[in-house]
Amino acid sequence: MNALIDYIQKEIHVTYNKKFSKKYIKDKLIPIINYICSSKSKKFLFGGSQGIGKSSFINIISRTIEKFYDKKILLLSLDNYYLSKKQRLLLSKKIHKLLVTRGVPGTHNINELVKNINQFNQEKYPIITPLFDKLIDDRIKLNKTIKTKCDILFLEGWCCGSSEIPKKFLYKNINNLEKINDPKNQWRNFYNKKLKIEYKKLFKLFDELIFLKTSSFDNVYKWRLKQEKTNQSKNKKLKRMSANEIKVFVQHYEKITKWMIKDLNKKAQIVIQFEKNHKISSINFN
């Protein structure tokens, strides 16, 4: 146990440049890892808001399981299946202008993702997955190739696990983006239909849902603002989004995120609440 905790503590320090206590790791991370490894399930779905730290969190969990539990993880990110910039532009002209922005259901290539999941189910390797670069907001020519048979599949994505949104909440304007740019609900109806059909079928392919829940949607804006500064440091040639542009950007995600916060408390097998400092405050096993 000590070696396991020491390893996780080191991984956290490398990832976040923070030192979390051994008690925190024992109380807040080990139970999640034990749950996954003791489960007979093979496919886990991770949902959670923009900026909450899904990728970092799941990478730490994955590396720990592979090192200490001798299980190989196939880690897929919904983000890598975003449509290209050109495809989204065509979609925006055909359906609604807001679809030029990546994010909502309908801006991913779900068929491609389902194909990769089926390859995992059938143990057909190599599995070749796409890659999306958020810094340029587009797909890149490189792919990721998984050659070794994997025991467990993780899929993480901001809207993973979301169900169709009830019309009463869907049509209520909760921000200026909706009020000004989608007065006839065309954008909302489009992505909600995608949730009802394509994404529902996708999510049903998984055995367990783990929901990373933010304590407040206000955190999303702060996290995304911080991410933008980090992105700029990685590529100084790219224009950084202003605070106001980020505010508008996260409004694309607001409705579904708030619906998930309401809807998944009892539906997810595990609900992990994160505070604004990215630390876990509670874990609920349903």
Image (cartoon, grey):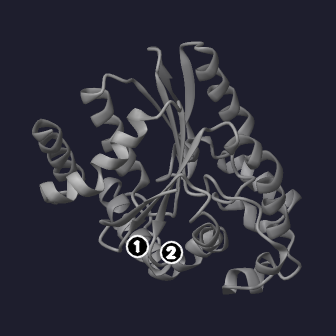
Q: Residues within 10 Å of mark 1 (few under 14, many from 20)?
A: many
Identify the image quadrant of residue 61: top left
At label 1, which amino acid type do we have?
Leu
Q: Residues within 10 Å of mark 2 (few under 14, many from 20)?
A: some
- Which amino acid does the dot numbered 2 rest on? Ile
Q: Which mark is residue 225?
A: 1
Report whether 176 appears left or right of 283.
Answer: right
Q: Inspect this view and state whether residue 141 appears.
A: no
Asked if disc 1 and disc 2 are in contact, CB closer than 8 Å, the reply is yes
Looking at the rendered image, the quarter that the N terminus falls into is top left
Q: Position of residue 38 (x, y in %)?
A: 40, 34
Residue 193 as seen in the image, left or right of residue 111: right
Q: Please report the residue visible at 60 percent of the width from the left and 69 percent of the height from the top.
A: 257
- Residue plotted at (41% across, 66% down): 273
Mark 1–mark 2 distance (CA, rounded to whole Å): 7 Å
Q: Residue at x 35, y 70 (%)?
A: 226
Residue behind mark 2: 246
Which one is earlier in the sequence, the residue at label 1 or at label 2? Answer: 1
Q: Is residue 97 above or below residue 111?
A: below
Q: Which mark is residue 112?
A: none
Q: Position of residue 157 (x, y in %)?
A: 55, 51
Is residue 59 or residue 23 the one in the foreground? 23
